[in-house]
Image: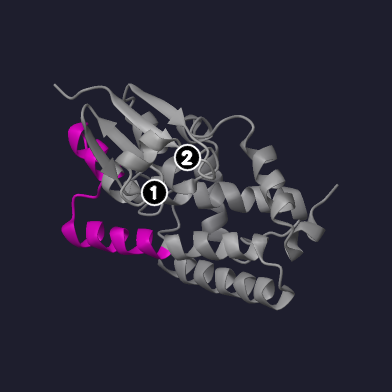
Amino acid sequence: MTPKLELISFKLCPFVQRAVIVLKQKNVDFDITYIDLNNPPEWFEAISPLGQVPVLKVGDEVLFESAVIQEYVDEITPPSLQPEDPLIKAKNRAWISFGNDILFAMHAMITSKDGEVMAEKQKMIEHKLAQLEAVHSGGNFFNGEAFNMIDAAYAPMFMRIDFIKNLSGLDLLEHTPKLTKWSDSLLKLDFVKQSVVEEVPQMYCGMIKNMDGVFASRLCD
């Protein structure tokens, strides 16, 4: 019998959110412990080899890296969220990795103190989103009508794109109708809505303001 799981989290981390989405979609009973990454407790430093979240405690064992945690949870709670076709499964994994670059570019865009860098990151994001649009099925989810692991991986990105639109008026999905449909499908799912704490939109806005980058001046009152 698998011990009760405990997820170590930072409230704003999109990679933790990926794991929470899978856990909630699978109706797994788990505890979640929030820490301050700027002032982590000593016990966290002892169990996290990278000093990052998410970390999943499985009894006395510890897993790290969001993709590893997602796949572990998926394997112990059939049926799988992965496509049955090995080639599609492999391609999905590659596009999940691709999505990491978009998340990192988004963070750089909203925190950069250099206007040229901010504009460069926005252009990079829009280019990558256009690439993603080109390979999307056109259905409610990436592969069609079934919710798969790749959908759990991209939901946090779309949630942050939605925050950015609401806060600044910038619609990064303006020219990607398939991604807009995908985003709408994901963000209305209860287990996606419940994958973050209620105050996350305000925390995201506060983070942008506190970083005092160029993008902060674009925030709506």
Q: Give the range drawn in magenta.
A: 70-98
Q: Is mark 1 on a helix, strand or loop?
A: loop
Q: In this view, does 172 lie to the left or right of 23?
A: right
- In the rendered image of this protein, does residue 115 appear above or below residue 32? below
218, above or below 17, in the image = below
Q: Main secondary structure of the magenta part?
A: helix
- Residue nearest the observer in this picture, 66 or 62: 62
Residue 206 horizontal/vertical position (percent): 71, 44
Quadrant housing the N terminus: top left
Along the horizontal axis of the image, is 90 left or right of 32? left
Three-letter amino acid code at the position of disc 1? Gly
Q: Which of marks 1 and 2 is nearer the N terminus?
A: 2
Q: Quadrant of residue 2?
A: top left
Residue highlighted by disc 2? 40
Q: Residue at x 74, y 51 (%)?
A: 209
**Amino acid identity at mark 2:** Pro
The reply to whether discs 1 and 2 touch (Cβ–Cβ < 8 Å) is: yes
Mark-to-mark CA distance, 1 and 2:
9 Å
Residue drawn at 74 percent across, 49 percent down: 167
Q: How crowded is mark 2: few (under 14 residues within 10 Å), some or many (20 or more)?
A: few
87 falls in the magenta region: yes
User: Does the magenta run of residues contain 94?
Assistant: yes
The image shows residue 162, relative to residue 24, as above or below, that is below
Q: Name the residue under label 1.
A: 51
- Residue 109 is tagged as none
Residue 10: x, y in percent?
A: 49, 39
In this image, 81 relative to 179: left or right? left
Residue at the image position 57 percent from the left and 54 percent from the top? 180
